């Protein structure tokens, strides 16, 4: 498909804007991860300073719910990044940065190694995959420990 100079200029402007938007979504993902951890930690810190009350059983679920909401928000950002990436790939193909004579140029057409090799080269990606699992498990474990220790303090179930 042949495009004229005006179309090429439009696509290049759009390309730059979409790459910028993608970077904003990446920053939003990092903020979402940070705020999920801070929110959970703030609730646990508050609970740790309070005398046990049976109504706190409801509060024990709040960090888990907050984490689920933040994770869903993070997933929506990741989905938007993937959509932008697919469109950028089409722009790269249309402009002609990817063809037999030049090979696979353009960010979305770069050669991608196997997933295992990619994770070895970029261990932070593996961390990001496990971040939400760890946060969910941490909230559950802390909640159970808090509940058991609070009930033990209040009702002396266990003798240490």
Image (cartoon, rainbow, N blue to C red):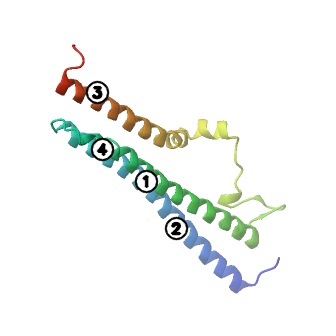
User: In the visual, does 82 lie left or right of 65?
Assistant: right
Q: Is residue 6 above or below residue 13?
A: below
Q: Nearer the viewer, mark 4 or mark 2?
A: 4
Q: Quadrant of residue 126?
A: top right
Q: Secondary structure at mark 3?
A: helix
Residue at the disc numbered 2 = 20
Residue 100 in picture, x, y percent from top left: 84, 61
> Tags 4 and 3 in contact by the CB under 8 Å rule?
no
Marks 1 and 2 sit apart, C-alpha to C-alpha, by 26 Å
Indicate which disc, 2 or 3, sits on the residue closer to the N terminus. Answer: 2
Residue 8 in picture, x, y percent from top left: 70, 79
Residue 131 in picture, x, y percent from top left: 47, 41
Q: Which mark is residue 148?
A: 3
Indicate which disc, 1 or 2, sits on the residue closer to the N terminus. Answer: 2
Residue at the disc numbered 1 = 69
Q: Which mark is residue 58?
A: 4
Q: Quadrant of residue 46?
A: top left
> Tags 1 and 4 in contact by the CB under 8 Å rule?
no
Marks 4 and 2 sit apart, C-alpha to C-alpha, by 42 Å
């Amino acid at each position: 498909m042949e495009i004229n100079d005006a179309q090429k200029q439009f696509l290049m402007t759009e390309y730059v804007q979409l790459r910028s938007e993608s970077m904003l979504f990446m920053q939003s993902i990092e903020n979402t991860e940070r705020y999920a951890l801070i929110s959970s930690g703030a609730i646990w810190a508050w609970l740790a300073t309070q005398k046990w009350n049976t109504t706190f059983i409801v509060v024990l679920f709040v960090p888990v719910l907050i984490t689920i909401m933040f994770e869903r928000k993070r997933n929506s950002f990741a989905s938007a990044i993937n959509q932008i990436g697919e469109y950028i790939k089409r722009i790269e193909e249309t402009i002609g940065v990817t063809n037999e004579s030049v090979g696979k140029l353009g960010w979305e057409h770069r050669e991608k190694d196997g997933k295992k090799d990619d994770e070895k080269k970029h261990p932070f990606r593996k961390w990001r995959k496990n971040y939400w699992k760890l946060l969910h498990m941490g909230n559950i474990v802390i909640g159970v420990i808090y509940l058991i220790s609070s009930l033990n303090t209040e009702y002396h179930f266990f003798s240490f």
